[in-house]
Image (cartoon, rainbow, N blue to C red):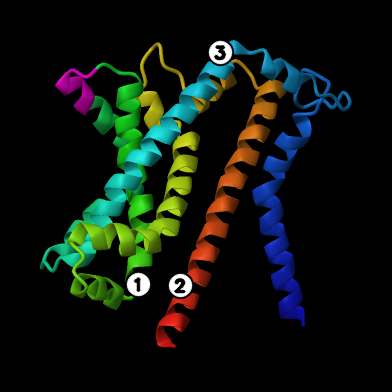
Amino acid sequence: MKKIRFSNFYIGLILVIMYLPILLIVVYSFNESKISSVWGGFSLKWYEMLKTDRAMHEAIGNSLLLGVLSCSAAAVIGTLGAVGMSRIKLRTKGMVEYISMLPIMVPEIILGMVFMTFFALIGLPFGMATLVIAHTAFCIPYVYMMVKARLAGMDISLIEAARDLGASPWRAFFDITLPLIFPAVLSGMLLAFAMSLDDVVISIFVTGAETNTLPVKIYTQMKTGVTPEINALCTIMLVVTLTIVGISGIVNKKSKVGKLRNEENYEK
């Protein structure tokens, strides 16, 4: 009993340390006072000021556009890569898969410097184009992992049956493989979108003077002091991120349930 009580106390303490700062940001986003450390009463004026901030609206629009473009490109590349790797047999297959995971294992500051040097060498102007390329590169592994895990549990006999009935490889892919792995693709896209929306390190290195994303905007404003307006914006971003992660979890759960039902139907 003592061990159980200590374990519960330890877990509770870790959770408080992890989530108390986030809770304070949410609470102080409703602070009347301009000084974040002083509570001046409940107010929604910082959310109202956020509505009229054109620079912030532009940064939000750029981040949303960047997230949609990068996660869409990552979905196509990551899905085709996972399907292709599942069908080939090479001695270097493990090495290729390991290399494909490097963007999420290499520190972001190194990736940012590499992208900045590469774009400068090829003469590509820094802006939305460089942001999309960089974000797509580090978003691909998230889609790849999700689709790879789904393909590992997929019954290959369904594709073989379609081919025996005269379906071409592309027809079998679009009619059989893609519908089965689509929940994993969608889950990977949502995760990639959340990671793109949250990125600040790589974006600082590859963004241009006329293109500003939301995380970079927040980072630059924090240098002059954190205001409750930033707390309000962080609260909104937190809600959006949690919503995306929640939808991704629901999609994964439904995918597993659908997989079990397909297996049961196939056995029958």
Q: How many residues crowd around disc 1 within 10 Å: few (fewer than 14), some, or many (20 or more)?
A: some
Q: Amino acid at mark 1?
A: Met
- The rendered magenta stretch, by its main secondary structure, is classed as helix
Residue wearing tag 1? 154
| Relative image position of residue 98 (x, y in whole percent) | 24, 58
- Residue at left 77%, top 27%? 37
Q: How many residues crowd around disc 3 within 10 Å: few (fewer than 14), some, or many (20 or more)?
A: few
Residue wearing tag 2? 259
Q: Horizontally, is 232 left or right of 252 in the view?
A: right
Q: Is residue 50 above or below residue 166?
A: above
Q: Earlier in the sequence, mark 1 or mark 3?
A: 3
Q: Are marks 1 and 2 in contact (CB under 8 Å)?
A: yes
Res 55 label: 3
- Residue at left 73%, top 69%? 8
Q: Is residue 109 visible?
A: no
Instruction: Say what secondary structure mark 1 lies in.
Output: loop
Q: Quadrant of residue 166?
A: bottom left
Q: Horizontally, is 199 left or right of 79 in the view?
A: right
